[in-house]
Amino acid sequence: MIRIERALVDDIEKLRQVGVQAFAEDTERYGASPAGIDLIENHRTWIETYHYYKILLEEVIVGGMLVMPADDAYELEALFITPKFQSQGIGSRAMTFLEEAYPNAKKWGLCTAYLNDSIRRFYEKRGYEKVGQTKPGNHPEVPDKDFHLFLFEKRVGSAASSS
């Protein structure tokens, strides 16, 4: 059974491990992990400052989500699932959880690496549309000089019908 709960300080090391595993392919491809997923200090800050969730299968942490709230617009900064449990509907369940947990959201935003076609399709199936792209300024060590992120948005509720 899948459960999603707010992450606790006691979860930091396991969330770090799962995040590193989940983004290992991107790290190999681009030369850097997204959003400092490998740093304990970042996980602590996310737990203490934002809405950070752990995704559990039975009692085992298999993923995480980081949400940055701002009034009626939210940024999904990270959604990660350990590779062993990817493509089993856990990500879809996590996205459903977010929409139910934030009923006042009028807009969701997120970004993903430009070469990751499967994750792009995952978000598009859930109603997200590509609205732009950007070059991340916080990864000067990335060897791929063409590296960029696709920006996605999803408008929900009354915001979706007025656009």
Image: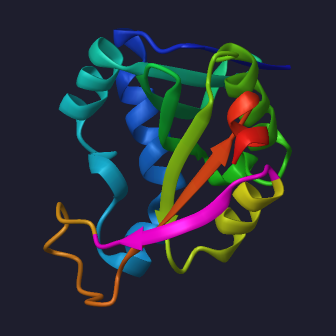
In the rendered image, is residue 143 in sight? Answer: yes
Q: Nearer the viewer, residue 86 or 79?
A: 79
Name the image quarter holding residue 11: top left
Q: Nearer the viewer, residue 110 or 49?
A: 110
Task: Name the spot of residue 18 as percent of width and height, x first.
Answer: 50, 41
Q: Nearer the viewer, residue 41 or 59?
A: 41
Task: Name the spot of residue 70 as percent of width and height, x first.
Answer: 40, 24
The answer to whether residue 32 is left or right of residue 71 is left
Q: How is the image coloured?
A: rainbow
> Height in image: 87 above or below 76?
below
153 falls in the magenta region: no
Q: Nearer the viewer, residue 63 or 160?
A: 160
> Height in image: 88 above or below 5?
below
Name the image quarter holding residue 141: bottom left
Report the residue at 26% width, 21% height from top: 44
Q: Residue farthest to the front?
A: 162
Task: Name the spot of residue 156 as percent of width and height, x first.
Answer: 72, 35
Report the residue at 46% width, 44% height from top: 19
Examine the residues drawn in magenta and state their main secondary structure: strand
Report the residue at 79% width, 30% height from top: 96
In magenta, the rendered stretch is: 126-135
